[in-house]
């Protein structure tokens, strides 16, 4: 499962951050998943608890926020929201477009808890 390796990579990054800050727990993580990132949010949501099972993140609350894709048209300069990655401009139907948002997987917020 593709999302399982993504979940592992995300958990690793959050764990690194937690270690860097010397925090004992992470209460909440917010992830932004672009609609063109090729990630199934439901599968990712299911994969996270499996990955964190024996880690310090097992009680962490995960929030996955889908981010709508956005393209910029080089022909008319308009921005629009494509349905898929084979997008054309919604205004002039030019295929000369650049994806400016929607391919990303971002760790938006990590809420750390200090305990001693
Ligand atoms: Zn256009």
Image: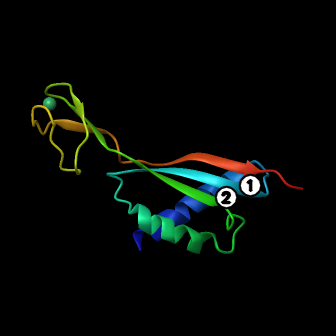
Q: Quadrant of the C terminus?
A: bottom right
| Tag 1 residue | 19
Q: Position of residue 73 (x, y in %)?
A: 19, 31
Q: Which mark is residue 50?
A: none
Is ligand 1 closer than 8 angstroms to the Cβ of mark 2?
no
Please name whichever residue, 14 or 109, is drawn nearer the observer in this view of the structure.
109
The residue that appears at 66% across and 61% down in the rendered structure is 60
Q: Nearer the viewer, residue 74 or 46?
A: 46
Q: Secondary structure at mark 2?
A: helix
Q: Is residue 81 above or below residue 62?
A: above
Quadrant position of ligand 1: top left
Image x and y of residue 44, in percent: 46, 65
Residue 5 on image: x %, y %: 48, 68
**4 is higher (above) or lower (below) than 111:** below
Colour mode?
rainbow
Q: CA distance from mark 2 to mark 1?
A: 6 Å
Mark 2 Cα-neighbour bin, 10 Å: few <14, some 14–19, many ≥20: some
Q: Is residue 29 above or below residue 49?
A: above
The residue carrying pointer 1 sits among few (fewer than 14), some (14 to 19) or many (20 or more) residues within 10 Å by Cα, namely few
Identify the image quadrant of residue 80: top left
In this rendering, would 92 be left or right of 20? left
**Helix or strand or loop: what does disc 1 sit on?**
helix
């Amino acid at each position: 499962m593709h999302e399982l390796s993504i979940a592992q990579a995300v958990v690793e990054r959050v764990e690194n951050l937690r270690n860097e800050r010397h925090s004992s727990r992470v209460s909440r993580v917010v992830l932004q998943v672009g609609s063109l990132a090729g990630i199934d949010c439901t599968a990712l949501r299911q994969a996270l608890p499996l990955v964190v099972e024996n880690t310090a993140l097992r009680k962490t609350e995960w929030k996955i926020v889908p981010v709508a894709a956005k393209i910029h048209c080089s022909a008319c300069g308009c921005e629009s929201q494509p349905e898929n990655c084979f997008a054309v401009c919604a205004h002039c139907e030019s295929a000369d477009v650049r994806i400016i948002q929607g391919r990303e997987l971002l760790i938006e917020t990590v809420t750390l808890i200090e305990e001693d």
